[in-house]
Image (tube, coloured by chain):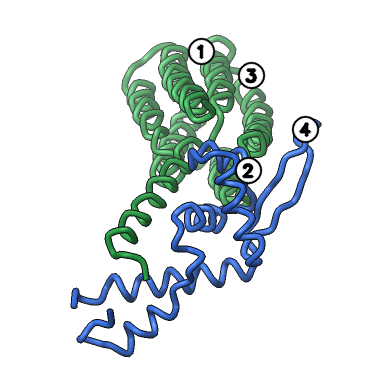
Amino acid sequence: MPSPSNPELSRAALNGLDKIFEHRVRLAVCVLLSRSDGITFRHFKDLLEETDGNLGAQLRRLEDKGYVSASKRFVRRKPVTWYRLTPAGRRALRAHVEALDVLLREPAG
Amino acid sequence: MSDPKQTAGDLAYVRAKLEQAEGHDAPGMIYFLWAVIVLVGFAIVDFAAQYTAWFWMIAGPVGGITSFVLGWRHAVDRGAVSRDKALRHGLHWGGLLVAVIALLPLLVTGRIAPESFPQIVLLLIVMSYFYAGVHLDRALIWVAIALSIGFLVVVFVAGPVWTAVGALIAASLGAVGFTRVRAARAFAK
Protein backbone atom coordinates (compact mmCIF):
# COMPACT_ATOMS: atom_id res chain seq x y z
CA MET A 1 0.00 0.00 0.00
CA PRO A 2 1.43 3.45 -0.85
CA SER A 3 2.56 5.34 2.22
CA PRO A 4 0.80 8.67 2.98
CA SER A 5 4.18 10.42 3.34
CA ASN A 6 5.10 10.10 -0.33
CA PRO A 7 2.57 8.05 -2.28
CA GLU A 8 4.19 8.81 -5.66
CA LEU A 9 7.57 7.58 -4.46
CA SER A 10 6.09 4.46 -2.91
CA ARG A 11 4.07 3.67 -6.04
CA ALA A 12 7.19 4.08 -8.20
CA ALA A 13 9.17 1.86 -5.83
CA LEU A 14 6.44 -0.81 -5.89
CA ASN A 15 6.58 -0.76 -9.68
CA GLY A 16 10.35 -1.14 -9.48
CA LEU A 17 10.10 -4.48 -7.69
CA ASP A 18 10.81 -7.44 -9.92
CA LYS A 19 8.52 -10.41 -9.30
CA ILE A 20 11.24 -12.87 -10.11
CA PHE A 21 13.13 -11.79 -6.99
CA GLU A 22 10.16 -12.49 -4.73
CA HIS A 23 11.51 -16.02 -4.39
CA ARG A 24 14.33 -15.91 -1.85
CA VAL A 25 16.46 -18.51 -3.60
CA ARG A 26 16.38 -16.57 -6.88
CA LEU A 27 17.19 -13.36 -5.01
CA ALA A 28 20.06 -15.05 -3.15
CA VAL A 29 21.43 -16.54 -6.38
CA CYS A 30 21.56 -13.16 -8.08
CA VAL A 31 23.00 -11.35 -5.06
CA LEU A 32 25.74 -13.98 -4.71
CA LEU A 33 26.48 -13.81 -8.44
CA SER A 34 26.68 -10.02 -8.29
CA ARG A 35 29.70 -10.40 -6.00
CA SER A 36 31.55 -13.01 -8.04
CA ASP A 37 32.63 -13.87 -11.56
CA GLY A 38 31.12 -17.33 -11.51
CA ILE A 39 29.53 -19.85 -9.16
CA THR A 40 28.92 -23.53 -9.83
CA PHE A 41 25.67 -25.42 -9.39
CA ARG A 42 27.25 -27.52 -6.68
CA HIS A 43 28.44 -24.47 -4.72
CA PHE A 44 24.92 -23.02 -4.86
CA LYS A 45 23.53 -26.34 -3.69
CA ASP A 46 25.95 -26.53 -0.72
CA LEU A 47 25.41 -22.90 0.21
CA LEU A 48 21.64 -22.60 -0.27
CA GLU A 49 20.90 -26.16 0.94
CA GLU A 50 18.36 -26.80 -1.80
CA THR A 51 17.57 -30.03 -3.62
CA ASP A 52 18.89 -30.50 -7.15
CA GLY A 53 15.38 -30.24 -8.54
CA ASN A 54 14.34 -27.06 -6.76
CA LEU A 55 17.65 -25.29 -7.33
CA GLY A 56 17.68 -26.32 -10.99
CA ALA A 57 14.16 -24.99 -11.46
CA GLN A 58 15.01 -21.60 -9.90
CA LEU A 59 18.18 -21.27 -11.98
CA ARG A 60 16.24 -22.15 -15.15
CA ARG A 61 13.67 -19.42 -14.38
CA LEU A 62 16.52 -16.91 -14.08
CA GLU A 63 18.11 -18.17 -17.30
CA ASP A 64 14.77 -17.96 -19.14
CA LYS A 65 14.43 -14.36 -17.97
CA GLY A 66 17.94 -13.62 -19.24
CA TYR A 67 19.30 -12.66 -15.83
CA VAL A 68 21.71 -15.55 -15.49
CA SER A 69 23.83 -17.40 -18.04
CA ALA A 70 25.17 -20.94 -17.69
CA SER A 71 28.25 -22.48 -19.22
CA LYS A 72 29.84 -25.90 -18.88
CA ARG A 73 33.55 -26.15 -18.25
CA PHE A 74 35.86 -28.91 -17.17
CA VAL A 75 37.43 -28.84 -13.71
CA ARG A 76 39.81 -31.70 -13.06
CA ARG A 77 38.33 -33.43 -16.12
CA LYS A 78 34.78 -33.30 -14.74
CA PRO A 79 32.08 -31.22 -16.45
CA VAL A 80 30.95 -28.41 -14.18
CA THR A 81 28.17 -25.89 -14.81
CA TRP A 82 29.13 -22.31 -13.99
CA TYR A 83 26.62 -19.51 -13.62
CA ARG A 84 27.18 -15.80 -14.17
CA LEU A 85 24.95 -12.78 -13.78
CA THR A 86 24.18 -11.15 -17.13
CA PRO A 87 24.21 -7.36 -17.60
CA ALA A 88 20.40 -7.48 -17.73
CA GLY A 89 20.38 -9.44 -14.49
CA ARG A 90 22.72 -6.95 -12.86
CA ARG A 91 20.48 -4.03 -13.90
CA ALA A 92 17.34 -5.82 -12.74
CA LEU A 93 18.89 -6.66 -9.38
CA ARG A 94 20.07 -3.09 -8.88
CA ALA A 95 16.60 -1.73 -9.70
CA HIS A 96 14.96 -4.22 -7.35
CA VAL A 97 17.34 -3.41 -4.49
CA GLU A 98 16.86 0.35 -5.02
CA ALA A 99 13.08 -0.10 -4.97
CA LEU A 100 13.34 -2.19 -1.78
CA ASP A 101 15.54 0.48 -0.22
CA VAL A 102 12.94 3.19 -0.93
CA LEU A 103 10.11 1.07 0.44
CA LEU A 104 12.02 0.06 3.57
CA ARG A 105 12.92 3.68 4.31
CA GLU A 106 9.32 4.87 3.99
CA PRO A 107 7.61 5.17 7.39
CA ALA A 108 4.92 2.55 8.14
CA GLY A 109 1.57 3.74 6.76
CA MET B 1 3.85 -7.13 -3.44
CA SER B 2 4.93 -9.81 -0.99
CA ASP B 3 4.21 -9.50 2.69
CA PRO B 4 6.70 -7.11 4.43
CA LYS B 5 7.49 -9.81 7.00
CA GLN B 6 8.31 -12.22 4.21
CA THR B 7 10.46 -9.57 2.53
CA ALA B 8 12.34 -9.02 5.78
CA GLY B 9 12.75 -12.77 6.16
CA ASP B 10 14.03 -13.08 2.59
CA LEU B 11 16.57 -10.30 3.13
CA ALA B 12 17.78 -11.91 6.36
CA TYR B 13 18.14 -15.20 4.47
CA VAL B 14 20.19 -13.54 1.72
CA ARG B 15 22.37 -11.74 4.28
CA ALA B 16 23.05 -15.03 6.09
CA LYS B 17 24.00 -16.75 2.84
CA LEU B 18 26.30 -13.87 1.91
CA GLU B 19 28.08 -14.13 5.26
CA GLN B 20 28.40 -17.88 4.82
CA ALA B 21 29.79 -17.41 1.33
CA GLU B 22 32.44 -14.95 2.58
CA GLY B 23 33.43 -17.20 5.45
CA HIS B 24 36.25 -19.30 4.09
CA ASP B 25 38.24 -17.78 1.28
CA ALA B 26 41.83 -18.86 1.53
CA PRO B 27 42.62 -22.57 1.70
CA GLY B 28 44.42 -23.98 4.73
CA MET B 29 47.37 -24.94 2.53
CA ILE B 30 48.39 -21.29 2.10
CA TYR B 31 48.73 -20.85 5.86
CA PHE B 32 50.70 -24.11 6.19
CA LEU B 33 53.01 -22.99 3.38
CA TRP B 34 53.79 -19.72 5.13
CA ALA B 35 54.17 -21.47 8.50
CA VAL B 36 56.98 -23.54 7.00
CA ILE B 37 58.56 -20.54 5.24
CA VAL B 38 58.47 -18.48 8.44
CA LEU B 39 59.87 -21.32 10.57
CA VAL B 40 62.84 -21.79 8.25
CA GLY B 41 63.30 -18.09 7.40
CA PHE B 42 63.36 -16.94 11.01
CA ALA B 43 65.66 -19.75 12.18
CA ILE B 44 68.13 -18.76 9.47
CA VAL B 45 68.50 -15.33 11.13
CA ASP B 46 69.86 -17.05 14.27
CA PHE B 47 71.90 -19.87 12.71
CA ALA B 48 72.98 -18.68 9.24
CA ALA B 49 72.37 -14.96 9.14
CA GLN B 50 74.41 -14.53 5.96
CA TYR B 51 71.71 -16.41 4.02
CA THR B 52 68.73 -14.48 5.44
CA ALA B 53 68.49 -11.97 2.59
CA TRP B 54 68.87 -14.67 -0.07
CA PHE B 55 66.25 -16.87 1.55
CA TRP B 56 63.63 -14.14 1.77
CA MET B 57 64.38 -12.72 -1.67
CA ILE B 58 63.52 -16.14 -3.10
CA ALA B 59 60.99 -17.55 -0.62
CA GLY B 60 59.00 -14.31 -0.38
CA PRO B 61 58.03 -13.90 -4.05
CA VAL B 62 57.88 -17.66 -4.71
CA GLY B 63 55.66 -18.12 -1.65
CA GLY B 64 53.51 -15.22 -2.81
CA ILE B 65 53.03 -16.57 -6.32
CA THR B 66 52.37 -20.08 -4.97
CA SER B 67 49.80 -18.66 -2.56
CA PHE B 68 48.05 -16.83 -5.39
CA VAL B 69 47.90 -20.00 -7.50
CA LEU B 70 46.70 -22.10 -4.54
CA GLY B 71 44.05 -19.51 -3.74
CA TRP B 72 42.75 -19.36 -7.29
CA ARG B 73 42.68 -23.17 -7.63
CA HIS B 74 40.84 -23.39 -4.33
CA ALA B 75 38.27 -20.90 -5.59
CA VAL B 76 37.76 -22.92 -8.79
CA ASP B 77 37.52 -26.22 -6.86
CA ARG B 78 35.09 -24.65 -4.40
CA GLY B 79 32.98 -23.36 -7.27
CA ALA B 80 33.04 -19.62 -6.62
CA VAL B 81 35.55 -17.31 -8.31
CA SER B 82 35.96 -13.58 -7.99
CA ARG B 83 38.63 -11.72 -9.93
CA ASP B 84 37.99 -8.69 -7.77
CA LYS B 85 38.77 -10.65 -4.60
CA ALA B 86 41.87 -12.21 -6.19
CA LEU B 87 43.07 -8.74 -7.24
CA ARG B 88 42.50 -7.37 -3.75
CA HIS B 89 44.57 -10.15 -2.18
CA GLY B 90 47.26 -9.79 -4.85
CA LEU B 91 47.52 -6.03 -4.38
CA HIS B 92 47.60 -6.30 -0.62
CA TRP B 93 50.45 -8.79 -0.40
CA GLY B 94 52.18 -7.39 -3.46
CA GLY B 95 52.14 -4.06 -1.65
CA LEU B 96 54.07 -5.62 1.23
CA LEU B 97 56.73 -6.88 -1.18
CA VAL B 98 56.99 -3.42 -2.76
CA ALA B 99 57.31 -1.79 0.68
CA VAL B 100 60.16 -4.14 1.65
CA ILE B 101 61.93 -3.46 -1.66
CA ALA B 102 61.43 0.28 -1.08
CA LEU B 103 63.41 -0.05 2.16
CA LEU B 104 66.49 -1.30 0.31
CA PRO B 105 67.71 2.15 -0.87
CA LEU B 106 67.61 3.29 2.77
CA LEU B 107 69.70 0.26 3.77
CA VAL B 108 72.17 0.62 0.92
CA THR B 109 72.69 4.36 1.54
CA GLY B 110 73.23 3.80 5.26
CA ARG B 111 70.10 5.63 6.37
CA ILE B 112 69.01 2.58 8.32
CA ALA B 113 71.43 0.32 10.19
CA PRO B 114 71.76 -3.23 8.83
CA GLU B 115 71.00 -4.70 12.26
CA SER B 116 67.69 -2.78 12.33
CA PHE B 117 66.59 -3.90 8.87
CA PRO B 118 65.01 -7.22 9.96
CA GLN B 119 63.05 -5.49 12.75
CA ILE B 120 61.73 -2.86 10.34
CA VAL B 121 60.69 -5.54 7.85
CA LEU B 122 58.99 -7.44 10.69
CA LEU B 123 57.08 -4.27 11.61
CA LEU B 124 55.92 -3.90 8.00
CA ILE B 125 54.74 -7.52 8.13
CA VAL B 126 52.87 -6.87 11.40
CA MET B 127 51.00 -3.99 9.77
CA SER B 128 50.29 -6.03 6.63
CA TYR B 129 48.77 -8.86 8.61
CA PHE B 130 46.79 -6.43 10.74
CA TYR B 131 45.27 -4.71 7.71
CA ALA B 132 44.75 -8.10 6.04
CA GLY B 133 42.81 -9.08 9.15
CA VAL B 134 40.70 -5.94 8.86
CA HIS B 135 40.07 -6.07 5.10
CA LEU B 136 40.61 -9.63 3.86
CA ASP B 137 40.33 -12.36 6.51
CA ARG B 138 39.49 -11.56 10.14
CA ALA B 139 41.46 -14.58 11.41
CA LEU B 140 44.72 -12.94 10.32
CA ILE B 141 44.39 -10.49 13.19
CA TRP B 142 45.52 -13.35 15.44
CA VAL B 143 48.61 -13.79 13.31
CA ALA B 144 49.17 -10.02 13.55
CA ILE B 145 49.01 -10.31 17.34
CA ALA B 146 51.58 -13.14 17.31
CA LEU B 147 53.76 -11.06 14.97
CA SER B 148 53.47 -8.03 17.29
CA ILE B 149 54.64 -10.12 20.24
CA GLY B 150 57.49 -11.39 18.07
CA PHE B 151 58.42 -7.85 17.11
CA LEU B 152 58.61 -6.77 20.75
CA VAL B 153 60.74 -9.81 21.58
CA VAL B 154 63.29 -9.18 18.79
CA VAL B 155 63.52 -5.50 19.72
CA PHE B 156 63.86 -5.84 23.49
CA VAL B 157 65.37 -9.29 24.06
CA ALA B 158 69.00 -9.84 23.24
CA GLY B 159 70.35 -13.08 21.83
CA PRO B 160 69.15 -15.63 19.24
CA VAL B 161 65.40 -15.20 19.63
CA TRP B 162 64.32 -15.25 15.98
CA THR B 163 63.83 -19.04 15.95
CA ALA B 164 61.44 -18.90 18.90
CA VAL B 165 59.61 -15.94 17.36
CA GLY B 166 59.33 -17.82 14.06
CA ALA B 167 57.90 -20.84 15.90
CA LEU B 168 55.26 -18.64 17.56
CA ILE B 169 54.23 -17.08 14.24
CA ALA B 170 54.27 -20.45 12.46
CA ALA B 171 52.02 -21.87 15.19
CA SER B 172 49.52 -19.03 14.73
CA LEU B 173 49.54 -19.53 10.94
CA GLY B 174 49.10 -23.27 11.41
CA ALA B 175 46.17 -22.71 13.78
CA VAL B 176 44.43 -20.47 11.25
CA GLY B 177 45.16 -23.06 8.56
CA PHE B 178 43.47 -25.80 10.59
CA THR B 179 40.37 -23.67 11.14
CA ARG B 180 40.19 -23.10 7.37
CA VAL B 181 40.48 -26.83 6.65
CA ARG B 182 37.74 -27.58 9.19
CA ALA B 183 35.48 -24.85 7.80
CA ALA B 184 35.94 -26.10 4.23
CA ARG B 185 35.08 -29.67 5.26
CA ALA B 186 31.99 -28.52 7.18
CA PHE B 187 30.81 -26.49 4.18
CA ALA B 188 31.26 -29.32 1.70
CA LYS B 189 29.34 -31.84 3.86
Q: Mark 3 points at which residue?
A: B51
Q: Mark 4 lies on which chain?
A: A
CA separation in Å, label 1 and label 2 = 51 Å
Q: Mark 2 points at which residue?
A: A41
Please identify, in this view, whether the residue under mark 1 or under mark 2 is nearer the observer: 2
Pinpoint residue B177: horizontal percent, then vertical percent: 49, 23
CA separation in Å, label 1 and label 4 = 48 Å
Q: Can residue B101 be seen in this view?
A: no
Question: Chain A appears in which tint?
Answer: blue
Q: Which mark is residue B23?
A: none
> What's the amino acid at mark 2?
Phe
> What's the amino acid at mark 1?
Asp
CA separation in Å, label 3 and label 1 = 10 Å
CA separation in Å, label 3 and label 4 = 45 Å
Q: Do marks 1 and 4 both belong to one polypeptide chain? A: no
Q: Name the residue under label 1.
A: B46
Please give left or right for residue B24 compared with residue B58 in the image: left
Question: Chain B appears in which tint?
Answer: green
CA separation in Å, label 2 and label 3 = 49 Å
Q: Are marks 2 and 3 in contact (CB under 8 Å)?
A: no
Question: Quadrant location of residue A98?
Answer: bottom left
Pinpoint residue A99: horizontal percent, then vertical percent: 40, 75
Q: Do marks 3 and 1 both belong to one polypeptide chain? A: yes
Q: Name the residue under label 4.
A: A78
**Residue visible at 47% across and 13% down?**
B163
> What's the amino acid at mark 3?
Tyr
Question: Quadrant location of residue B49?
Answer: top right
